[in-house]
Structures are given as C-alpha cells and as structure tokens.
C-alpha cells in the first residue's frame, strides 16, 4: 500500500512541477504577484511529495518487500540495515529518485530562503527549476519507475552488488548529486536573467553562495568517490581517468571557473555575460554526466543502440535543456549590459586567466571522454582514450594555473601590480626553491619532474599563507594588532587561503604517491615475511569467517618497522552467496599521512596466497587537501557578506574583532 | 555521478570474475619477469595498453583473463628482445589501435590531440583582443589619477562616514592601492 502511495505521490509531484513550470512565467509576464506567488508553494509541496515517494521506497527496502521489482533486484533480507537503506540509491531507478529529491529540495530552499529576492526573479527561477524537475519526473515514471510490482513475489531478493555494500556508497552518491543538482540553481538563475533581460544586484549576490554550496558538495563527493575506489577496489589507484569519473570532473572544473567569475561579477560587476554562460555550462555538464552514466552509452555504443529507451529519453532532455539554454543565451546575451572595466594585470585579470585555463582543462576532459564515442558512432572505428592521454594534456594546463594561484589574491582589483605581488611572494618562492634543493639532494638522479612538482606545491601552499600574513600585517605590526587584524579579516579571505592551500596539499600527495609508491606482489604462506619500503609484513594465518550475508577469507598480517611491532592488518576476500560474486577488502595501516596497503588475491594450488602490498607515501594528503578546499568553501560561505544578502555599512567605532 | 564511481566501470570485470569464478587481481606473482629492469618496462607498457573486454581499464589494472594473456604476451615480447616501440607495434598489428590507451597522432585523432592547445590559443587570442579593446576604453573613459589633495579629501570623507574598518575588511585591510590608481 505504501508503495502505491509513494508512486502516487511521485505523480502528484509531476503535476505540481507542471504547474510550477507554467503559472509563475505568466505571473511574471502579467506582473501578477498572486500568480508569481504560486511558484513558492508548489516548490515546497513538490519537495514534500517527492520526499514521501522516496520515504515509501526506503520503507519497501527496509522491510524487504520483494513484491517490488526494484527491491527484489537490489536487496536481500540478510543484508545489514545500513545497506538496505543505501541500496535505495544503489541502482538506476532509486538513484534517479534521489536526483529529483535533491532537485526539489533545492527548489524548496530557494522558495523558503528567497524572500529577499525580487518576486519576478524568484518566480522565474522556480519556474526553470520546475521545467527540469518535470522532465525528470516524466523520465522516472515512463522509463525508470522504482515502484513497479511483481505479480508473484519471490521469497528472496537478488542482493545489492557487493562492491556497493560499503559505507563509501552510503555517502558518495548523495554528496555528488547535491553538487550536480546544486548547479541547477545557478542554471535557473542564469535562464531567469536571460528571460528578464537584465542582471540585477540581487542576482549576483545570490548566485555565488549557491554555486559555492554546490561546489563544496561536488568536491567532497569526488574526493569520497576517489577514496572509496582506492580502498574498495583493491589495487590502490585513486583516479583512473575513467569516463564515469570524468563525468563528475567536468562539472567540477566548470563550477570552479564559475565560482571565480562570480566573484568578479559580485565585486566588480564585470564578466556578467561570461558568468551566465558558465552557469549554463556547469549544469549542462552535470546533465551530460547523468546521461553518460545512466544511458549505458559508455558500456558500448551498441548496447545503447539495442536498448535505447532510457538513453534516448535522457538524450532528449539533454538536447532540449542544453540546446535551448544556449540558443536563449545567444539570442539574449548580447542585450545584457557589459560590466566594469579593468586592466589586464588585476585581480579580475587573474580570475579571467583562471577561467581560461579551467575551461580549457574542462574542454580537454570533454573531448577525451566523448571522442571515442563520437568516432565510433560516425565512422565505426574504435579507439581508446585513457590515462596516458589525460596525463599528457591535462597536466600541462594545470601547471600555469597552479603557478598563478598565489598571485591572484595578492593583486588589487581593477589595476594590480605584479612586481609588488611577486615581492610579497618572495618567501613562498624561497621556500619552494629550498624544497626543490632538498628533494633533489635526497633523491639524487631520481625522477626529474617530481622535485619540480613538489616545489610548485610548496609555492602554492606558502603563497596562500603569505596572502593571510600580508593582509594581517603580521610582519609590519605588533603581534597583538596583527592577530586582531587576522581575526577581523573577512571569512572569504580565510576561505580563499584554505582552498588554495588545499590545492597545494593535494598536489603534494599526488606527486609523492605516484612517484615514490612501492609495490610488492608475492605468493606467501603462513610464517613468511614480505618487506616493502622497510615494513615487514608477516603472514600469521589465513582463516575463514562468516559475515551476515557473505563468507570471507581473512589473512592476518603482523606489521613491523625497524623491529617495532606496529599492529595487525587483516585484508580479506568476501564471497557473497546471493550473487556468487566476490569483493576484496584491502587493509590499511596509516602512519602520518602515509599508508601501508594490503590486498588479497587467489589461494594457489600449493596453499600459498597471492598478496599485493603497497607503501603509499603521503597518499592521505590527496584527500586531506580536497577536504581543506571544501573547508575553505564552507568558510567563504559563512562570510557575513553572503549571509546577510546585502552589504550593510558598519556602525561607527565598531571594534574590529566584531566585524568577524 | 550516479552511483559509485567504479560500479559501471568494473561491472564487466565483475562479470568476468563471476565467469572465471575467482577474484584474481591484476598482475599475478607467476607473471613477474626475473629481470627487474624488464619487469619495470613491462609494467610501464601494461599501463598504456587497454584490456579490450573491460571498460577503460589498462591490462595492468584488469583482472580479466584476456588482460593476463596480454600481460604475458608483453613479457614474452620483451623477453624476446623487442624494444618498447616494437612491443606496441606488435600488439597494434594484432588487435588494432583500440588497444592503445594513448591514441596515436593521426588523421582520425587530429581533433582529439589538437583541441586542447587550439582551445587555449583561441581563448587567449580572444582575451588579448578584449584586453586591447578595453585598454582603449579604459584610457579614454577613466579620469586622471587622483591628485595628492584629492586623495587627502577622499580619506577624510571615508573617515567621516565611519566606513574605514568594514570596507577595508571587505577587501582585505591592505588595499590603499585602489585609491592610488
């Protein structure tokens, strides 16, 4: 019964989204506040109904109602409760339901917190959200309905793909979707501005925090997915330049560019037309990512051609929204007023350079991901584009970007002074050269690029800190005064410093891991010891264990370093009875930011077991850096200027520390 | 996007794993070559070659039986004294360019390889044009720099309004450069 109620709620949500798509547009056209007001209430009601539908599906999973096809195909009564719940979005239908749930959540948030937006703008934004939502409700109901029943319900379900039965899966897709779908807000604002034909001050103040919010989630989602792949898939890689990963990297690159150009627009009222284009692109790439993964086109062009219902549907959505918004853009954008002027060397100029490099990087990933598909569709010829291509093309674009990062915040708006900025970065430059010399001396004749990359990372980190030190006047003023000044700096300044430093930290991790990771592959029997990078891993025993819905073979390794016992690692291999499939559970020993990583292979005929042992120096910095970046975003989001909606003049004699 | 990253990617692999009813991992201990230098070459080459039944995995990463066959083939060629280029040519002749994760620079891949530099070039050229146009507009429109007296008055005005603390905070405390322009 509850399943049917959920199904019906989804139909009602579709109906509401149709109302939300049409009525407010007429309201804005006729300047009728009552018609425009409809947008807010439909958005909130739509969210409530979608939440109910999602709840209904979750209940079906929790009680293991195998009369529902979706539950039967993706769940099992013996599965732990956590994975019953996460299984809701661990499949196509459920993940699309999560997609629209988050979309309607964002619409509801605009409706609730948008009270200080001009009514016509708010209602147009919500109407555009309604269009997107309606398209996806129809998609779900027509091709991917999670509420369908089976006439003769089976006793047991087929279980969730065991690779997905992991805490990483619980967190990764919702985070990623919050990021993807969050860009729909910037998109809707862009379309609303194009329809209205003007960009108001309220527009600029709104778009940046929403973009920032989406960007934070997307950053965390990508990092989470990468860490999940690292420990779950058992071969120690954390980024594979796989189309599925690229599909999330593209919106991230476009979103990062959007974030920076939105700063220019907010502060200096420049780059308006470009910001609108980026907002459209960021969400279009999110839609493209959804298409790539959901249509099955990546598996094979032929699979797509043989069962095209879903794929063609999403492709149609893609064409309508991307084509439509770009057409609208080319029609209306020339009428938008151009913004303020600035010299090439200025904060604005630096942000434009950032945009140029990020969008080129995004275009590189785009062409690399789609070229094989396009070539095969057009000529039938099959080529592969993999990691070696991306490393060769993407890497060089990021080097100038990273070099420029520390300069940006040190340049003044309108007209900057490179020499002055360079002087202030002297300390960072010296540190970078020191790092270069140290690493060169330490490795002597090793990889030539790695020391340079480390120097670059150090330059980025110290450069980000120099900006804070400079702005707090730490070297010029008394310590107490400069501390007060540091506390009084706007949080967005702190946010910038954290995010930029995080970039450097992540680079440091990437370089160290990929240059100096050591690997041993061996067949070992109990009592044998394998040595990797000074760590001695001794296999104590191999035992069988029974889990809730799997059997596992567990190897116990005791780890020593320099004769000191560090602990035990228990990598395992799980066999899931329902699907007859298996997963490797790597075991990790963390020391500082470095990790020892053991994954199990097959048991051999002679009783020995194959193991892969890695030592990955500073590997955790990769994710620590990403979290720093996201934290910088959070700091910037909490900036007073963004919270209050409009900058207010400070009261006279206000003490500095209260300015927060 | 969607579900977990690797799910789709590894689906095929998992299908293979089920088919071969054991979860092996990529390089097996018995594959490793005796000469460490040759093994390093084999691993490096393996990373450039695609496992053709997998989704975008190199044969170095893949658990599929075909990937193992290819890894052994690479090692066999290296053992027979082939150079890296000869190994790649041998595999391309057998399996076509599909096996190369780094596509060759040829007619069909021209757009693929040239797009990044061309996009960067066009972007930079457009920017330069805009800069020159704006530079002219800026020198035309903008008033002359403030004189010393004007700067003094401006500072007074700012102080009167009590703006100084918050405004400076908004742009960072040091930023007198704006008034100097």
Image (spheres, coloured by chain):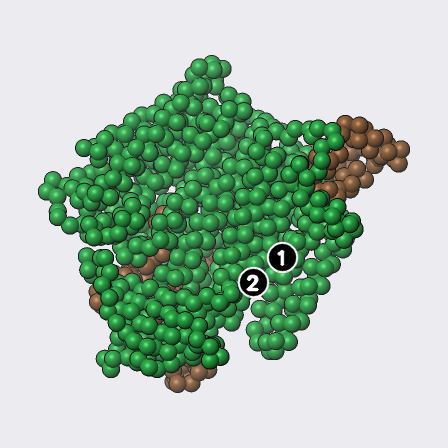
Chain colours: A green, B brown
Residue at horizontal 60%, vertical 61%?
A457
At label 1, counting other C-alpha atoms closer than 10 Å, the crowd grade (few under 14, some 14-19, many 20 or more) is: many
Q: Would residue A254 appear left or right of A148 to someone viewing this image?
A: right
Q: Are marks 2 and 1 in contact (CB under 8 Å)?
A: yes
At label 2, counting other C-alpha atoms closer than 10 Å, the crowd grade (few under 14, some 14-19, many 20 or more) is: many
Residue at horizontal 45%, vertical 51%?
A222
Secondary element type, mark 2: helix
Give the mark, 2 or 1, whose residue is nearer the N terminus: 1
Is A234 placed above or below A31 here? Answer: below
Q: If the image is split into quadrants, where does the N terminus of chain A sit?
A: top left
Q: Which residue is mark 2?
A: A508
Indicate the quadrant where residue B15 lies. bottom left
Percent across and percent down for residue A66 are 17, 44
In this rendered view, identify the residue nearer to me: A264 or A660.
A660
Q: Which residue is mark 1?
A: A461
Secondary element type, mark 1: helix
Q: Which numbered circle lies on residue B26?
A: none
């Amino acid at each position: 019964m509850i399943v049917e109620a959920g199904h019906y709620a989804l139909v009602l949500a579709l109906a509401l989204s149709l109302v939300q798509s049409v009525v407010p547009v007429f309201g804005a056209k006729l300047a009728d506040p009552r018609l425009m007001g409809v947008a807010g209430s439909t958005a909130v009601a739509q969210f409530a109904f979608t939440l109910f539908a999602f709840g209904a599906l979750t209940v079906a999973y929790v009680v293991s109602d195998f009369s529902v096809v979706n539950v039967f195909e993706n769940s099992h009564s013996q599965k732990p409760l956590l994975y019953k719940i996460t299984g809701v979005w661990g499949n196509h239908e459920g993940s699309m339901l999560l997609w629209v749930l988050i979309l309607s959540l964002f619409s509801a948030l605009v409706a609730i917190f948008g009270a200080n937006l001009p009514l016509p703008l708010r209602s147009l934004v919500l109407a555009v959200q309604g269009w997107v939502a309606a398209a996806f409700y129809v998609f779900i109901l027509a091709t991917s309905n999670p509420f369908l029943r089976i006439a003769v319900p089976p006793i047991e379900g087929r279980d969730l793909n065991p690779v997905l039965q992991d805490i990483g899966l619980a967190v990764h897709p919702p985070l990623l979707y919050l990021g993807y779908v969050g860009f729909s807000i910037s998109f809707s604002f862009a379309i609303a501005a194009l329809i209205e034909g003007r960009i108001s001050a309220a527009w600029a103040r709104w778009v940046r925090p929403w973009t920032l919010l989406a960007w934070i989630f997307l950053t965390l989602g990508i990092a989470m997915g990468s860490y999940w792949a690292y420990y779950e898939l058992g071969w120690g890689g954390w980024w594979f330049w796989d189309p599925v990963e690229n599909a999330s990297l593209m919106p991230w690159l476009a979103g990062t560019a959007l974030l920076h150009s939105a700063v220019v627009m907010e502060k200096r009222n420049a780059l308006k037309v470009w910001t609108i284009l980026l907002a459209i692109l960021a969400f279009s790439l999110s839609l493209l990512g959804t298409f790539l993964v959901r249509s099955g086109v990546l598996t094979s062009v032929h699979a797509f051609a043989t069962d095209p219902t879903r794929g063609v549907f999403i492709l149609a959505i893609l064409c309508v929204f991307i084509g439509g918004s770009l057409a609208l853009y080319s029609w209306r954008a020339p009428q938008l007023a151009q913004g303020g002027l600035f010299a090439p060397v200025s904060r604005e100029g630096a942000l434009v350079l950032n945009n140029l490099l990020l969008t080129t990087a995004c275009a590189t990933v785009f062409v690399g991901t789609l070229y094989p598909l396009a070539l095969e569709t057009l000529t039938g010829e099959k080529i592969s584009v993999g990691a070696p291509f991306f490393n060769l093309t993407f890497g060089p674009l990021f080097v100038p970007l990273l070099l420029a990062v520390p300069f940006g915040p040190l340049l003044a708006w309108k007209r900057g002074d490179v020499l002055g900025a360079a002087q202030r970065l002297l300390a960072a430059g010296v540190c970078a050269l020191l790092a270069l010399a140290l690493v060169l001396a330490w490795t002597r004749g090793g990889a030539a690029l790695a020391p340079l990359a480390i120097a670059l990372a150090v330059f980025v980190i110290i450069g980000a800190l120099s900006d804070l030190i400079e702005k707090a006047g730490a070297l010029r003023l008394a310590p107490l005064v400069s501390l007060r000044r540091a506390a009084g700096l706007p949080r967005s300044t702190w946010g910038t410093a954290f995010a930029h430093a995080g970039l450097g930290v992540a680079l440091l991790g990437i370089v160290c891991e990929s240059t100096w990771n050591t690997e041993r592959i061996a067949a070992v029997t109990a009592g044998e010891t394998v040595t990797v990078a000074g760590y001695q891993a001794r296999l104590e025993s191999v035992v069988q264990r029974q889990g809730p819905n799997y059997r596992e073979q567990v190897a116990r390794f005791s780890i020593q370093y320099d004769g000191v016992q560090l602990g035990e690692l228990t990598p395992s291999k799980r066999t899931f009875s329902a699907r007859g499939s298996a997963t490797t559970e790597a075991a990790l020993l963390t020391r500082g930011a470095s990790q020892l990583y053991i994954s199990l292979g097959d048991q051999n005929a002679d009783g020995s077991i194959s193991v892969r042992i890695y030592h990955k120096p500073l590997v955790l910095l990769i994710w620590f850096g990403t979290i720093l970046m996201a934290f910088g975003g959070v700091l910037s989001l909490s900036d007073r200027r963004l919270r209050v909606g409009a900058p207010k003049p400070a009261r006279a004699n206000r003490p500095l520390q209260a300015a927060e | 996007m969607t579900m977990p990253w690797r799910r789709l990617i590894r689906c095929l692999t998992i299908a293979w794993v089920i088919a071969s009813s054991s979860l092996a991992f990529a390089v097996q201990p018995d594959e490793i070559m005796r000469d460490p230098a040759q093994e390093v070459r084999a691993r490096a080459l393996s990373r450039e070659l695609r496992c053709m039944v997998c989704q975008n995995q190199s044969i170095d990463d893949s658990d599929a039986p075909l990937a193992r066959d290819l890894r052994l083939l690479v090692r066999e060629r290296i053992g027979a004294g082939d150079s890296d280029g000869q190994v790649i040519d041998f595999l391309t002749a057998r399996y076509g360019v599909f096996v190369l994760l780094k596509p060759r620079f040829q007619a069909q891949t021209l757009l693929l390889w040239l797009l990044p530099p061309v996009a960067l070039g066009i972007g930079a050229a457009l920017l330069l044009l805009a800069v020159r146009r704006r530079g002219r507009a800026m020198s035309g429109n903008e008033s002359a720099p403030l004189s010393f007296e004007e700067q003094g008055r401006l500072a007074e005005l700012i102080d009167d309004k009590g703006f100084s603390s918050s405004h400076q905070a908004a742009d960072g405390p040091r930023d007198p450069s704006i008034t100097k322009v």
